[in-house]
Image (cartoon, rainbow, N blue to C red):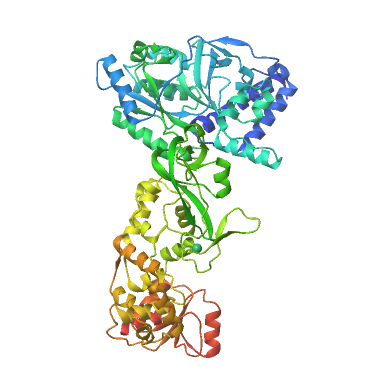
Amino acid sequence: MTFTEAKARLAVLKKEIDRQRYLYHVEDKPEMSDAALDSLKHELYGLERAFPQLITPDSPTQRVGGKALAKFEKVTHAAPMLSMEDVFAPEEFDEWHARVAKLLGRDRFDMFCMVKVDGLATSINYDDGMLAFAATRGDGKVGENITENVKTIDAVPLALHAPTERQVDAFCAAHRGAIDEKKVRRALSGRAGRIEVRGEVYMTQKAFDALNAEQKRKSEESYANPRNLAAGAVRQLDPKVTASRKLSFFAWDLAADIGQTTHSQEWELLRLLGFNANRESILAKSVAEVRAFWKKTQERRARLGYWIDGSVVRVDDNASYERLGAVGKTPRAMVAWKFPAEEVTTVVEAVEWHVGRTGALTPVAQLRPSWLGGTTVKHATLHNADEINRLGLKIGDTVILYKAGDIIPKVKEVLVKLRPGDAKAVSLPRVCPACGERVARREGEVALVCDNRACPAKQVEFMANFVSKRAFDIDGLGYKVVEQLMDGGLLARPSDLFRLKKEDLIDLERFGEKSAENLVAAIRDRGNVTLPRFIIAMGIMHVGDETALDLARHFGTLEKLRGASKEQLMAVNGIGEVVADSAVEWFADKKHRHMVDDLLEAGVKVQKTERPAAAPWQGLAFVFTGTMESMTRDEAKDKARALGADVSESVSKKTAYVVAGPEAGSKLDKAKKLGVKVLNEAAFLAMLKQQ
Ligand SMILES: [Zn+2]
């Protein structure tokens, strides 16, 4: 390849690589795989090696060119990099708005709303379109020169992007009258002199996770926070270390007058110049819109892929912004509206012990209600007795409560200096709070355990059965969620379910606004339950689906069933002494009676079961296997039962019919072997129709 050919090829390669960078970081629409892009860079690198005189400072190969420094040089900022006033509660934001409105002399003004990315504020300077130098915020007036490190960040253009003529025309047309068009066009054509762009160097969740996975692989300690990591990386003296951290950049300020008059225009201009100006931003016309934005970003927070800790709101009009000026180091026209605190102090009023699935007793702190992470918190798990010792917790103590991620709140620390004179030690229970049996500490285990196999308060199991498809059939309430609710102290007795509110759930892991609402609705929806389902939910030993139905049909109402004697129970068709004893014993238990009353009091309605008027299939045993198309297998069973049929799970000589759908397994084989009549779905439906 000749020098001229190489020069031409290099030019197109650089242009295309930068276009791909732009598509990836600014448009978020990559057109090329990473591998293909690497291949282009590889070619570029090869050409530059052959013709080193063609290397330019804006070449992608120059991102990691710098040598390690002995120390950073100081850079004085053209204009100070100010910090922001923080507000937390909505009322505080309203106060800010009222203050600004008064100073501006008008109630309504446009506000530009951005997400507050948790990173390191950085100034990047371009001279006639080429990256000249970059600096940290430092003390606001003087920062450190981190040019070589910033160049390693792929989201930072080494040369300002040149927008197409059409893009420029569109921008000018959209803002005609509100911009100095001549100036804008001049700047966008790359002849603007010095342009300073300010923004946030940060680390994406993905890069953070990858780095921690690598740490884990090397058996090294994991990093806690991408912000600290990004801040550390950008201040590395060796740019190679910075490059390895895969940092990213969001631009949030165009600190140069290139003909714009508002911050929202700057957002568009930054994108046209090749920067990733965050897409979550909006232009708000009213306080209500800002509030909605703040709320929405808080909900979306976990899904953004980078850490944010609030929103930033500023007066959109630049002239007004300037006029409002600064108080000390903070501009009046801008405010950081932070998300609710992740830590709060509160008082432990009591410690209750809850019995978990395995019988392990978990201490749960009952707290003076406090506002944490956007919800009211009343309980926090203390895990086990050792944790109470580790914390040195006494009842009456003031504690720091925190939420890591969006999980159930935990006690972080006891503020011993605030301990009242009458603080009480937490006593370990000697007996299970649910069944009264003695508890023990198993050899080698931390937890106190109730070993009573019949302990009704191995409640997760109980509750899982209670909400299962066979019983209350509550959609969206699986084992995990039941466990989560019980561990969090939200669910101790089944009646608690019917008292759950959206606000109780919304902040739990796996829950959002919508799913919390759905679950509460699903529970309410199932509060009206059939008697057989209710019986199954009680988890009475030896009482399965069939028995529950027999009992329901015989007694008709819960009241009659509850009061039945052993003799009355044994009179029910198909019920023997074992079941009768078990049922009588169950209903005689005070705790159980209380639980049933409690459910009724919480609004649960148990329907009457009518004795089937006609039972044409009385005495016929059905077995269902395989899938059905027109209904679920459970629905088919219900229909058969409604006609008096017995539904069984296993095929025997007594089976009258096996209803087999596709994917039927061994039951079908057995039916054939025993000569039991097999029906397909259509034949079964036809039989139903005849009744
Ligand atoms: Zn127990």
Residue 688 in view, yes or no = yes
Residue 558 point in image, percent of width and height: 31, 73
Q: Quadrant of residue 420?
A: top left
Q: Determine if residue 190 is in view.
A: no
Q: Residue at x 53, y 27 (%)?
A: 119
- Foreground residue among 59 and 284: 284
Query: Is residue 563 rendered to the left or right of residue 257?
Result: left
Residue lying furthest front: 421
Give the total number of marks visible in the rendering.
0
Instruction: Residue 184 in the image: state x and y as whole percent.
Output: 42, 15
Q: Is residue 516 left or right of residue 277?
A: left
Q: Is residue 432 left or right of residue 100?
A: right
Depth check, front residue: 163 or 595:
595
Residue at 52% across, 81% down: 668
Quarter of the image with the C terminus is: bottom left
Question: Is residue 286 shown above or below 651?
Answer: above
Q: Quadrant of residue 603?
A: bottom left
Q: Quadrant of the N terminus?
A: top right
> Which residue is rendered at x = 39% and y = 64% of the image?
473
The residue closer to the viewer here, 481 or 440, is 440
Looking at the picture, how far across and down is residue 158, in whole percent?
58, 21
Residue under the image location 70 percent in, 27 percent down = 45
Is 449 or 436 nearer to us in this picture? Answer: 436
